[in-house]
Image: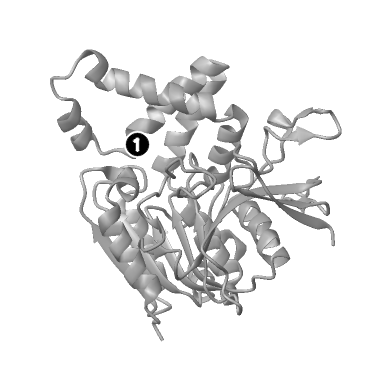
Amino acid sequence: MSFSVNELADGKWQFTDDAGFEFESGDHITPLTLVYETYGELAPNKDNVVVIHHALSTSSHVSSQPKNTTPGWWENMVGPGKPIDSNKYFIICINNLGSCFGSLGPASHNRATDKPYGHKFPSTTITDMVNSQRQLLQALKIKTVHAMIGNSMGAMMSLTWAILYPDEVKHLVSVSSCYKIYPANQANRVLQQDIIALTPGEEGFIVARKHALLTYRNWHQLNKRFADKSGEESIINYLDYNAKKFVRNFDLQAYLTLLAAMDTFNICRYFADEATTFRRLQANVLIVTVDSDVLYTPDQQDDLYQAIKAVSGKVKLIEHHSDYGHDAFLVETDAFGRYISEFIGSTHE
């Protein structure tokens, strides 16, 4: 057995595979390390697994637990009696390959140089992230997943898994995402990459993050929230405070790695055309779009819905009304909890 699983002091688990990991680029890194958190108990027949794929800026800490009582990024959604109920499901959230919260990424130690990989970390794709996590699930002898739930970049991973390995996913929930890169999304990320390149170091990273923050909320909501506000209550202070807080906790090269991964995303590139791609899906699919999202606009999710609907009847689209834009799934958890719990709790047979 080439792998080990060890519990960390804060309740996370660390998976280490000495066989390493091979990227789509052909690069190979040894070992593969992934950090993850679990909630609930795995059923004897392992049929109650729910995988949550997190977005770019978050981590595996989706909810608080006994060894880490800090609220998670989806605290109201995951846990005993919550919409994604740990009394019913075995829930696992894995820090993505290329990120910087324990899993293998640019900030990881390179045995060959005795330094962090930094900008020499291999080019990483959404499919690489999926394949690394699949390597973990295979080691845990988990062959099928009751539900995969992804938000934003995480939903790209959930969709990729359900298409590349269709017999492994029963329910797929895609929230505020897409199935391919769109020009406006690419422009948003190119601006951030250019800002960082032109202003190296922390200062450029902070400015780039300020730009990103403006895409996570709808401008109508920002105008209402910050109208006639000044000083500490101004939008300028809001951007400054949140961007600096993020930069203190996130590795710059990891950020660039993940932006680049999204820039190359198109699940259809592996197959002849869209119909061939989406005909592979066996999972029941729920797509949730937010009408005020300016990052992954409703038409992008409608394109995904129509592409699946054209070849399968097992897809449902929910259009969520909100002033909060892309971040609605983090803020309005009552509604999103209802959408998801009803969907993954039904049999859809």
Colour mode? one colour
Residue at the image point whose x is 39% and y is 49% from the top: 75
The answer to whether any part of residue 83 appears in the image is: yes
List x then y, in percent, for residue 23.
73, 50
Image position of 335 (left or right of 135): left
List x then y, in percent, for residue 304.
40, 63
Residue at the image point whose x is 39% and y is 78% from the top: 314
Badge 1 crowding class, 10 Å Cα cut-off, few under 14, some 14 to 19, many 20 or more, is: some
Residue at the image point whose x is 37% and y is 56% from the top: 77
Height in image: 204 above or below 154?
above
Nearer-the-camera pick, 323 or 298: 323
Q: Quadrant of residue 294?
A: top left
Nearer-the-camera pick, 210 or 94: 94
Q: Amino acid at mark 1?
A: Thr
Secondary structure found at label 1 = helix
Q: Residue furthest front?
A: 66
Q: Residue furthest top?
A: 231
List x then y, in percent, for residue 308.
41, 71
Height in image: 60 above or below 303?
above
Residue at the image point whose x is 57% and y is 75% from the top: 43
Q: Residue furthest left?
A: 228
Image position of 170 (left or right of 138): left
* Residue position marked by numbered label 1 in the rendering: 215
Q: Quadrant of the C terminus?
A: bottom left
The answer to whether any part of residue 302 appears in the image is: no
Q: Quadrant of the N terminus?
A: bottom right
Image position of 8 (left or right of 66): right
